[in-house]
């Protein structure tokens, strides 16, 4: 049995993974990190959070979707203490993206490292599309 999928690939690693995969009414957004379009990481967790959400927005647009379609997100951070120290700013970025009281399940996980040593946050999402 073959599952019907629509994928979006972009960036320097597009041959290795899809940034977004839609199957039925579900869109799976691969973990997006805090890099600009040229691949340069943001300077701190605040800037990287903003960039990660911009990258998520870009993937959503490829499927004619928006932040309001996201039902679940997982944050992977390399330093929980730093994330919590900057919680007003990083969760402020989340509020800018989703609104003040988002109807989005969230999981926050500390990890040992991300794909590049400068990266401090990666955000993975699942959206339900109509």
Image (spheres, rainbow, N blue to C red):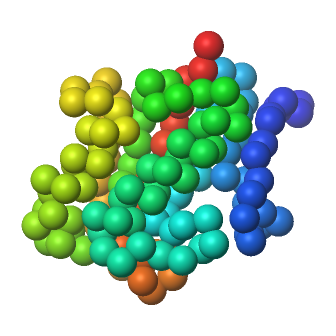
- Residue 41 position, x and y percent, is 48, 76
Q: Is residue 20 left or right of residue 48?
A: right
**Residue at the (13%, 53%) spot, across then down:** 88
Can the viewer see residue 79 in this picture? yes
Where on the picture, by quarter, is residue 72? Answer: top left
- Residue 55 position, x and y percent, is 54, 53
Where on the picture, by quarter, is residue 77? Answer: bottom left
Judge whether 69 appears above or below 73 on screen. above
Judge whether 35 appears above or below 104 on screen. below
Where on the picture, by quarter, is residue 43? Answer: bottom left
**Residue at the (14%, 71%) spot, across then down:** 81
Q: Quadrant of the C terminus?
A: top right
Judge whether 107 appears above or below 65 on screen. below
Q: Is residue 31 left or right of residue 88?
A: right
**Residue at the (80%, 36%) spot, across then down:** 6
- Residue 99 position, x and y percent, is 29, 30
Judge whether 73 appears above or below 67 on screen. below
- Residue 39 position, x and y percent, is 60, 74
Residue sitting farthest toward the bottom: 117
**Residue at the (63%, 72%) spot, across then down:** 38
Total residue callouts: 0
Residue sitting farthest toward the top: 130
Q: Quadrant of the N terminus?
A: top right
Can the viewer see residue 121 in this picture? no
């Amino acid at each position: 049995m073959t599952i019907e999928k629509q994928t979006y690939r972009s960036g320097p690693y597009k041959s290795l993974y899809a940034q977004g995969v839609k199957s039925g009414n579900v869109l799976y957004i691969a973990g997006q990190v805090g890099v600009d379009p040229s691949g340069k990481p943001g300077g701190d967790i605040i800037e990287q959070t903003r960039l990660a959400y911009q990258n998520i927005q870009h993937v959503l647009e490829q499927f004619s979707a928006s932040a309001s379609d996201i039902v679940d997100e997982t944050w992977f951070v390399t330093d929980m203490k730093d994330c919590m120290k900057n919680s007003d700013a990083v969760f402020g970025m989340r509020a800018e993206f989703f609104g003040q009281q988002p109807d989005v399940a969230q999981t926050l996980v500390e990890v040992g490292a991300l794909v590049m040593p400068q990266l401090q946050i990666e955000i993975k999402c699942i959206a339900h599309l109509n």
